[in-house]
Image (tube, helix red, strand yellow):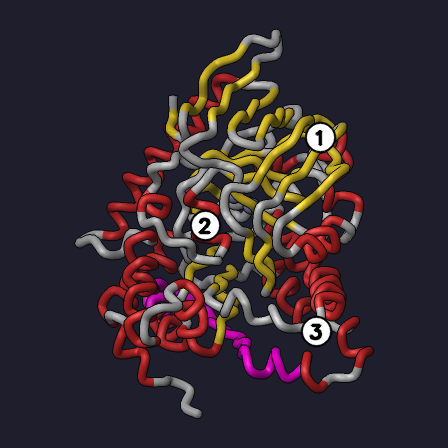
């Protein structure tokens, strides 16, 4: 086995370097002297190298990369003793949390095979995920609370490309996924950094309008959906670039098409149907239908992956409540590509979505100064999980509900009204 297999030839190196440059300049806004922690699948080494190069060119102090590998992950499920599945690398996550405390930025490269664990025992997958979530919590909080600048970009792993384009030979699948990633990440243009500045300005215009309206709820209607999502007290809409508590402006997700805010954990009523399958850590969960009462999911069904869905909902009390609601027009470039990526980073940007679990404290007015107790009092949810799933389509309408009960069209047939 070689570390850099020959499928690399399917990926345009000039565009890959632009993706690395955009990740550093737009995604992270990396500052001179700032350290950087990278996590990546081992297949993404060529992108890690470009990111590292541009990080040092931007004046990075020290770049440290940590790799995961699909075969070694599977070896655990095939051969490890049962007790292994309650373990996690606490020491590694504690070190990462310490690095972030000391001012390091964080970059994650996504691109693992979304179906890697599909054949494995769901109970073991759930235990391993829970142990990992608990160990990761101190580091994840620094990210979720936006203490530091962070970014996620994607690499066209061959195993992922085969999932997305099962009918193509591997090299053609990788080439096609690479081009889709480059287009969605806006690096297939002459000046990607300028393209991102314009895109960020557009997203700011939308979030600015919603912040001016101060809706108390959003009402979604469509096939299988009649859902009222109450918004948290003092919620604030965000989208595109935003400024972390360390003062650095970054674009956490590349790509991103969403404007999003915090729902009220106790004020979600009605039922909703998913509009795209959710790929959750190796399992495809399809045709989700859930019913909310008082903000809590009291009934959950899925045509595929229902067992995994119910395990996810049982993670903790907050797993049955919403931590995010996001608006994405149906005509977004990712939606227009018609590709199902089996990767939330892309698929959530094709559609309006909601997320089960942890809320983002930055989605509150003056969020940086609020204590966890204040966030809870204002309706912010807390959980070990944060899982986005898609509820938008060209058949879904959304109204903004004002405090006096009057309604304002926000989206019609999936487009901004
Ligand atoms: Zn989102
Ligand atoms: Zn989310």
Say which quadrant the C terminus sits in: top left
Q: Residue at x 48, y 18 (%)?
A: 212
Residue 89 got which mark?
Answer: 3
Question: Within 10 angstroms of label 1, few (less than 14), some, or many (20 or more) residues?
Answer: many
Residue sitting at the far front: 303
Whether residue 90 is visible to the viewer of this picture, yes or no, is no
Residue 347 got which mark?
Answer: 2
Is 242 colored magenta in this rendering? no
- Of badges 2 and 1, the one in the foreground is 2
Residue bounds of the magenta highlight:
54-76
C-alpha distance separating marks 2 and 3: 29 Å
Q: Are marks 2 and 3 in contact (CB under 8 Å)?
A: no
Return the x and y of residue 153 as percentages of the image width and height: 42, 59
Question: Within 10 angstroms of label 2, few (less than 14), some, or many (20 or more) residues?
Answer: many
Q: Residue at x 67, y 67 (%)?
A: 93
167 horizontally vs 377: left or right: left
Residue 71 got which mark?
Answer: none
Location of mark 1 (residue): 379
């Amino acid at each position: 086995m070689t570390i850099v297999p020959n499928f690399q030839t399917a990926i345009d190196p000039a565009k890959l370097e632009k993706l690395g440059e955009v990740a550093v300049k737009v995604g992270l806004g990396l500052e001179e002297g700032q350290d950087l922690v990278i996590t990546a699948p081992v297949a993404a080494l060529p992108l890690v190298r470009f990111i590292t190069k541009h990080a040092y060119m931007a004046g990075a102090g020290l770049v440290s990369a940590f790799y995961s590998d699909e075969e070694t992950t599977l070896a655990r499920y095939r051969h490890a003793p049962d007790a292994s599945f309650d373990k996690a690398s606490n020491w590694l996550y504690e070190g990462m949390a310490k690095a972030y405390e000391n001012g390091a930025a964080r970059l994650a490269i996504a691109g693992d095979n979304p179906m890697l664990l599909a054949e494995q025992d769901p109970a073991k997958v759930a235990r391993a995920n829970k142990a990992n979530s608990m160990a990761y919590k101190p580091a994840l909080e620094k990210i979720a609370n936006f203490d530091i600048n962070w970014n996620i970009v994607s690499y066209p792993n061959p195993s992922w490309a085969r999932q997305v384009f099962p009918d193509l030979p591997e090299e053609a699948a990788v080439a096609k996924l690479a081009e889709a990633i480059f287009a969605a990440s806006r690096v297939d243009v002459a000046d990607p950094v300028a393209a991102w500045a314009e895109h960020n300005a557009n997203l700011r215009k939308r979030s600015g309008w919603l912040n001016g309206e101060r809706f108390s709820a959003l009402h979604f209607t469509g096939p299988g959906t009649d859902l009222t999502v109450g918004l948290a007290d003092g919620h604030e809409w965000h989208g595109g670039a935003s400024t972390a508590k360390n003062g650095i402006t970054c674009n956490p997700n590349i790509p991103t098409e969403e404007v999003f805010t915090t729902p009220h954990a106790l004020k979600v009523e009605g039922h909703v149907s998913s509009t795209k399958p959710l790929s959750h850590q190796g399992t495809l969960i399809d045709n989700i239908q859930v019913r909310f009462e008082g903000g809590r999911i009291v009934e959950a069904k899925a045509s595929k992956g229902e067992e995994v869905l119910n395990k996810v909902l049982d993670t903790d009390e907050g797993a049955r409540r919403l931590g995010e609601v996001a608006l994405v027009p149906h005509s977004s470039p990712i939606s227009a590509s018609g590709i199902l990526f089996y990767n939330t980073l892309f698929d959530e940007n094709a559609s309006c979505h909601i997320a089960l679990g942890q809320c983002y404290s930055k989605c509150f007015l003056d969020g940086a100064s609020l204590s966890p107790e204040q966030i809870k009092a204002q309706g912010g949810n807390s959980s070990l999980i944060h899982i986005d799933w898609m509820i938008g389509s060209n058949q879904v309408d959304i109204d903004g509900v004002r405090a006096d009960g009057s309604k304002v069209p926000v989206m019609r047939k999936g487009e901004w009204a």
